Image (tube, grey):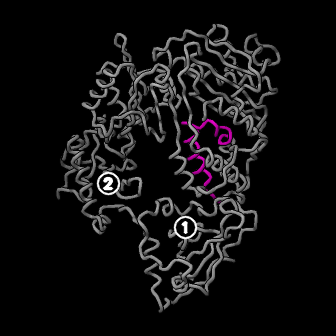
């Protein structure tokens, strides 16, 4: 019955031994896969699956209970987070792990239906209050009825003024036999660190889904690789260069369209005629907007005398005498690096003349990473603590018990082919969220996430348990940073470590390759990859891994060369298998004739002296952390070797 008392089960990992095993709540409705409950203790709406109902106790009884909340609020608190209310299919924050006990069926726990409205109090008032958060308008009609109507309209006017100032469109008579695409307003609130509204935002977006295929030819636009970003940071730290970051305001509005596109007048802002907007510049929502912006930026950089690198099309370099300047762009986020402060100021000033910038400051928050650069001490730290905190909160793991390793040694991930065993937990959502952390600053997650990504097609509850184990590890290591230290001139400019785990995958017996690359002794690139073929021995698996690592090693060599870094020291790739080293230095024998020719290209770079293969003791092979789950002792040792502190 609506309004009855409900007891939501608290998982073992989220409570101490003598804590309560359940949380007292009020039943207020249903979501897709769980019950909607008002937590009396936490004063917020939660989702629950393991719930026991007491229909003899109701809202009025709870309100009168002095030991509990003294009154049930009719409005939600302002600090209720979006994550607590936004996605129903995200499983209850209190029930993130699979229970060992038998899960109650819906029939056993579903409350009885009561068709009459209780006369003693108005439940629907509480229901309306508890289920209606501080919602964002979805369209102009909702803006008209919103309490903050004037503030939303002010934000809309600011957006239109920005579009007009930019010369985004001109009003023309409606053309015949030409598709006119619709648009919509997207609203949002920018909050401060305390959750208070800092700014009301409105953005006009074209509905690119309505574009015909003839309206555009290409949509691709590049973004900088994570390894390129880290390489530039390592070079800047080693060379003691100056660095700043910039953010282009409304970047997509700066691109020019190749073909004319017609759009309806903005909803709620029409001049009352049948005229339409002929777009002169790109606008958010068009399929080619990103490409148009990237091309515009490239043209402006050429005018400033910069050259785009072939190894990464999002990096520009300019040399003039003894001055060198690098510019890296990731969509609308920019990093500028130079050996001269005057050159840095000149370039940032010129970019500001071309594009409106929302900020220009020393390195700080960039793509969800926190970059702390101490130029004088020669130490640069990259971490994603704030991002990890958000992930922990989103998946209800803020109070989870930490683990020492992301995946226990010897763990075997077996794929599932039974649809009935598919988990209802948001496996892919969590996997993707963790991948983002791994790709930028947490190489220690590489193996665990690679193995779990192989079963994302049909994950089970057991796979979900392995995935939440990674979150437990992050709970205890969220403050860990990838640290770059300034090395002396005797250090190698570029080096790599490569290893393989033979026949790791039990489903097809394919091996796993793992490797990492260092620039000025700082880890800038790492990878864990399943090999495409079944190898017949450990030596073959190591040889194939060596070829895969060589591809990325040559990419970094080309990148550094284009950046003007003189490769005066030999590039070294460390390998712990003598058989693989022998195979890479000698002509093919009958034992390896079945290996695809594409893996033999590694010999070319060894024979011409570009790369030198050196043997390393297995215990010192830090690439071992990228091939299989390790015990805590070796795992921590290799984390230190990677620069994780």
Q: Around disc 1, counting alpha carbons within 10 Å, would you say few (fewer than 14), some (14 to 19), or many (20 or more)?
A: many
Q: Is residue 243 left or right of residue 199?
A: right
**Quadrant of the drawing holding the C terminus:** top right
Q: Is residue 232 left or right of residue 101?
A: left
Instruction: Give the overall secondary structure of the magenta segment.
Output: helix
Whether 133 is drawn above or below 276: the answer is below
> SS for tag 1?
strand
Residue on which the image places disc 1: 46
Residue drawn at 32 percent across, 38 percent down: 359
Q: Which residues are magenta?
A: 424-450
The spot of residue 504 in percent (x, y) is: 77, 36
Q: Quadrant of residue 604?
A: top right
Camera-side residue of 508 and 53: 53
The spot of residue 116 in percent (x, y) is: 51, 90
Residue on which the image places disc 2: 199
Q: Is residue 432 left or right of residue 104?
A: left
Q: Earlier in the sequence, mark 2 or mark 1?
A: 1
> SS for tag 2?
strand
Which residue is outermost to the top? 608
Regarding residue 238, the answer to whether it shows in the image is yes
Q: Is residue 153 left or right of residue 569?
A: left
Residue drawn at 60 percent across, 61 percent down: 91
Whether 472 is drawn above or below 41: the answer is above
**Quadrant of the drawing holding the N terminus:** bottom right
Q: Quadrant of residue 587?
A: top right
Residue drawn at 38 percent across, 54 percent down: 191
Task: Please say whether residue 440 is one of the residues in the magenta stretch.
Answer: yes
Camera-side residue of 247 and 361: 361
Regarding residue 458, the answer to whether it shows in the image is no
């Amino acid at each position: 019955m609506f309004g009855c008392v409900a007891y939501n089960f608290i998982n073992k990992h989220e409570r101490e031994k003598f804590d309560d095993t359940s949380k007292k709540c009020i039943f207020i409705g249903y979501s897709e896969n769980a019950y909607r409950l008002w937590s009396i203790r936490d004063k917020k709406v939660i989702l629950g699956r393991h719930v026991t109902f007491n229909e003899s106790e109701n809202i009025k009884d709870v309100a009168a209970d002095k030991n509990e909340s003294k009154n049930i609020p009719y409005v939600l608190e302002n600090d209720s987070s979006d994550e607590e209310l936004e996605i129903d299919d995200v499983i209850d924050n209190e029930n993130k792990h699979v229970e060992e006990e038998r899960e109650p069926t819906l029939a056993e726990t579903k409350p009885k239906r009561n068709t009459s409205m209780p006369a003693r109090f108005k439940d629907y008032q509480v229901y309306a209050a508890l289920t209606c958060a501080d919602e964002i308008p979805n369209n102009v009609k909702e803006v008209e009825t919103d309490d903050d109507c004037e503030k939303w309209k002010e934000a809309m006017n600011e957006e239109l003024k920005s579009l007009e100032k930019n010369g985004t469109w001109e009003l023309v008579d409606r053309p015949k036999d030409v598709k006119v695409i619709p648009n919509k307003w997207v609203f949002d609130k920018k909050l401060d660190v305390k959750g208070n509204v800092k700014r009301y935002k409105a953005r006009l977006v074209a509905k690119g889904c309505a574009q015909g295929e003839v309206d555009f030819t290409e949509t691709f636009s590049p973004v900088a690789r994570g390894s390129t970003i880290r390489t530039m940071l390592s070079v800047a730290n080693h060379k003691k260069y100056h660095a700043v970051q910039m953010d282009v305001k409304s970047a997509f509005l700066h691109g020019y369209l190749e073909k004319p596109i017609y759009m309806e007048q903005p909803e709620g802002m029409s001049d009352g005629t049948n005229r339409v907007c002929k777009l002169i510049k790109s606008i958010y929502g068009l399929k080619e907007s990103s490409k148009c912006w990237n091309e515009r930026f490239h043209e402006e950089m050429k005018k400033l005398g910069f050259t785009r690198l072939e190894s990464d099309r999002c990096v520009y370099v300019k040399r003039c005498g003894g001055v060198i300047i690098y510019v890296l762009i990731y969509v609308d986020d920019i990093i500028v690096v130079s050996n001269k402060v005057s050159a840095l100021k000149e370039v940032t000033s010129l970019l500001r003349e071309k594009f409106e910038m929302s900020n220009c400051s020393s390195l700080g928050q960039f793509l969800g990473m926190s970059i702390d650069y101490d130029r004088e001490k020669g130490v640069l730290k990259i971490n994603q603590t704030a991002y990890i905190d958000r992930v922990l909160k989103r998946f209800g793991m803020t109070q989870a018990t930490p683990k020492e390793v992301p995946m226990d040694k010897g763990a075997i991930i077996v794929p599932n082919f039974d649809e009935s065993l598919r988990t209802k937990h948001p496996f892919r959502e969590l996997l993707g969220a963790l991948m983002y952390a791994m790709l930028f600053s947490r190489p220690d997650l590489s193996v665990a996430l690679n193995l779990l990504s192989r079963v994302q097609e049909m994950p089970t509850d057991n796979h979900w348990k392995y995935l939440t184990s990674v979150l437990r590890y992050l709970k205890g290591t969220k403050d860990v940073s990838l640290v770059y230290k300034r090395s002396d001139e005797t250090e190698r400019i570029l080096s790599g470590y490569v290893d393989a785990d033979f026949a790791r995958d039990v489903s097809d017996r394919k091996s796993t390759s793992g490797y990492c690359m260092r620039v000025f002794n700082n880890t800038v690139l790492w990878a864990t990859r399943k090999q495409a073929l079944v190898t017949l021995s450990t030596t073959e698996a190591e040889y194939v891994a060596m070829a895969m690592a060589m591809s990325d090693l040559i990419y970094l060599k080309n990148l550094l060369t284009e950046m003007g870094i003189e490769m005066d020291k030999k590039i070294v790739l460390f390998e712990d298998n003598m058989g693989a080293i022998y195979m890479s230095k000698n002509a093919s024998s009958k034992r390896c004739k079945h290996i695809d020719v594409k893996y033999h290209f590694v010999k070319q770079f060894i024979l011409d002296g570009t790369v030198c293969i050196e043997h390393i003791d297995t215990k010192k092979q830090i690439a071992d952390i990228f091939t299989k789950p390790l015990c805590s002792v070796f795992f921590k040792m290799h984390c230190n070797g990677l620069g994780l502190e």
